[in-house]
């Protein structure tokens, strides 16, 4: 039977210590609500003594959480603990988390205290916290660089003082998994009363080993892991919550444990943290990165299309990503190209497909990113040679908050120039109504979407429209630095496809 591993999320405390990741109260509350939706066991909401803002944020989060425990961090100073309790006491399930450094490096250069002074300080702090709250966690900062005998002695004393969770931080990401395994085993053997408390680990990622160290600790008795969304935190960050959770879930054959996390909310939570902190997620980030379920190699694409298990050890849907992404480029093969053409609605003969694939490869050698619009352009204009009955010649739009939006459109239809003007509820609506008036078409607009292909104020906008007429639907796309022009191009592109479809030259 698998054992429960508690997930202690410190995104709002340690994660906020990432340079540039400071959050306001409203943002912290929003993240806490998402973390509770994700079903984390403990939310470390902040460090109340550090600022009035942090105190208020912890207090607000404590009031709002219904299921998750809410922890407040405090040094061993009594005023820290008192302030932490004042903030977290509103929680349904409050926790005080107090800490002090135990390594000789920190004692000598930071604290200027002896080992005995640190031991006495730690015990006093835990006893005081215990009078405020039954749920008390103690952390030995820089534990992995501490003298193991002194550390075990101190841990035994804080357990006697009332600590319910004992946390072993690898504060500077110094430990190697094999070393950390022995370290945890030594604590398990030598600390009297350790079986009565929850053993926790908090690993940093300075050597890229935070997740590995966390998992080896779990295999050796740790039953709480402290981590952050996207692995954000001091310096190189913390152990990544999503990686730990999915490692346990995916390798349940070796890691016979479980968490309460609801994985389908991982992707949305990751994106929320990225948006609020402004910290971009690296594309190759495990589990939630843009490339985590993207395949560009032709060999990989062929395998994925035949059986996803060939190159995916978990499904994108399991972490909240809609689907696998087949990225078409110069490394893509015929199988992936054929499937994409089919997804776009075109049915080509083998000869037509071969011609389209050859042209696609030529384009891929020149263009890094191949969009569906590029493939459609190849298929429609170069292979099937769909006649463009409608062509945009000129577009002028007048709009504003005191002006009725007006569009003047000039088009070439069957070789003849035609021009009309029309009004609408906005510049795009006016443009579409005018085009519809000129072309005398009856298609109904089902969908309209704008996407920025590039970044910056001069970004190229890609517009996608979906039209329906007599049960038939088509998708049109257009790109331009002016989104109104891009919208007109997309609408006309769709109209041309609809005309072509009516002639039954293409099955879409």
Image (cartoon, rainbow, N blue to C red):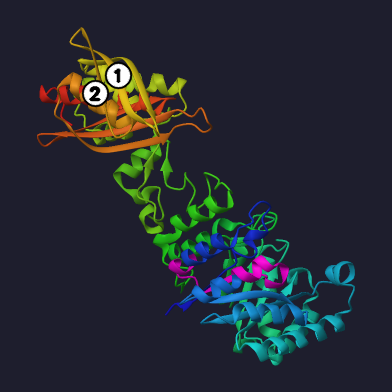
Name the spot of residue 223 as percent of width and height, x first: 56, 77
Secondary-structure class at tag 2: helix
Mark 2 crowd level (few <14, some 14–19, many ≥20, 10 Å Cα): many
Q: Position of 475 compared to 4: left or right?
A: left
User: What residue sits 25% from the left and 14% below the top?
Assistant: 411
Name the spot of residue 310 as percent of width and height, x first: 37, 48
| Residue that carries the numbered disc 2 in the rendered image | 434
| Residue that carries the numbered disc 1 in the rendered image | 408
Real-space Cα distance between discs 2 and 1?
7 Å
Asked if the residue under mark 1 is in contact with the one under mark 2, i.e. CB atoms within 8 Å, the reply is: yes
In the depicted structure, whether residue 472 falls above or below residue 142: above
User: What residue sits 58% from the left and 52% below the top?
Assistant: 277
How many numbered dots are placed on residues in this image?
Answer: 2
Name the spot of residue 461 as percent of width and height, x first: 42, 30
Marks 2 and 1, the one that precedes in the sequence: 1
Question: Could you say which is closer to the camera, residue 302 or residue 424?
Answer: 424
Mark 1 crowd level (few <14, some 14–19, many ≥20, 10 Å Cα): some
User: What residue sits 65% from the left and 71% below the top?
Assistant: 55
Secondary-structure class at tag 1: strand
Name the quadrant containing residue 433.
top left
Name the quadrant containing residue 301.
top left
Question: Could you say which is closer to the camera, residue 430 or residue 362?
Answer: 430
Question: Could you say which is closer to the camera, residue 116 or residue 274?
Answer: 274
In the depicted structure, whether residue 223 falls above or below residue 424: below
Q: Is residue 170 magenta?
A: no
- Residue pushed farthest front? 402
Which residue range is magenta in the image? Answer: 35-57
Q: Quadrant of the C terminus?
A: top left
């Amino acid at each position: 039977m698998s054992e429960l591993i508690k997930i202690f999320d410190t995104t709002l405390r340690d994660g906020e210590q990432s340079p540039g990741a400071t959050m306001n109260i409203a943002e912290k509350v929003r993240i806490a609500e998402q973390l509770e939706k994700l079903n984390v066991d403990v939310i470390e909401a902040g460090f109340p003594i550090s600022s009035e803002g942090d105190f208020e944020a912890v207090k607000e989060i404590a009031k709002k959480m219904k299921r998750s425990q809410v922890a407040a961090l405090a040094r061993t100073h009594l005023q820290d603990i008192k302030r932490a309790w004042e903030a977290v006491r509103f929680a349904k399930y409050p926790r005080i988390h107090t800490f002090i450094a135990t390594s000789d490096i920190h004692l000598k250069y930071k604290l200027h205290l002896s080992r005995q002074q640190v031991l006495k300080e730690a015990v006093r702090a835990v006893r005081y916290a215990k009078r405020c709250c039954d749920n008390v966690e103690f952390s030995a900062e820089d534990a992995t660089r501490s003298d193991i005998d002194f550390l075990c002695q101190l841990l035994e004393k804080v357990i006697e003082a009332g600590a319910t969770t004992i946390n072993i931080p690898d504060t500077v990401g110094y430990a190697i998994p094999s070393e950390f395994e022995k370290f945890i085993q030594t604590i398990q053997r030598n600390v009297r009363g350790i079986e009565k408390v929850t053993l926790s680990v908090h690993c940093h990622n300075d050597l890229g080993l935070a997740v590995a160290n966390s998992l080896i600790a779990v295999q050796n008795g740790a039953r709480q892991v402290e981590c952050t969304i996207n692995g954000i935190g001091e310096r190189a960050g913390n152990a990544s919550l999503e990686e730990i959770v999915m490692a346990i879930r995916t390798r349940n054959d070796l890691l016979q444990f479980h968490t309460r996390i609801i994985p389908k909310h991982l992707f949305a939570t990751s994106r929320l943290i990225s948006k609020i902190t402004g910290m971009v997620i690296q594309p190759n980030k495990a589990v939630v990165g843009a490339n985590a379920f993207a395949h560009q190699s032709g060999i990989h694409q062929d395998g994925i299309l035949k059986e996803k298990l060939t190159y995916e050890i978990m499904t994108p849907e399991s972490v909240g990503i809609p689907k696998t992404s087949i990225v078409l480029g110069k490394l893509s093969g015929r199988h992936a190209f054929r499937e994409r053409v089919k997804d776009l609605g075109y049915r080509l003969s083998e000869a037509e497909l071969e011609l389209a694939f050859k042209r696609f490869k030529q384009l891929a050698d020149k263009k890094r990113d191949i969009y569906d619009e590029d493939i459609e352009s190849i298929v429609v204009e170069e292979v099937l040679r769909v006649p463009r009955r409608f062509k945009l010649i000129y577009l002028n739009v007048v709009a504003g908050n005191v002006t009725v939006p007006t569009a003047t459109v000039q088009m070439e239809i069957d070789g003849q120039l035609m021009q009309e003007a029309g009004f609408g509820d906005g510049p795009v609506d006016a443009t579409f109504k005018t085009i519809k008036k000129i072309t005398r078409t009856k298609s109904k607009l089902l969908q309209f979407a704008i996407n920025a292909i590039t970044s910056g104020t001069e970004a190229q906008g890609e517009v996608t429209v979906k039209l329906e007429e007599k049960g038939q639907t088509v998708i049109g796309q257009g790109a331009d630095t002016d989104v109104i022009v891009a919208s007109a191009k997309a609408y006309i592109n769709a109209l041309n496809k609809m005309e072509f479809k009516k002639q039954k030259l293409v099955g879409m």
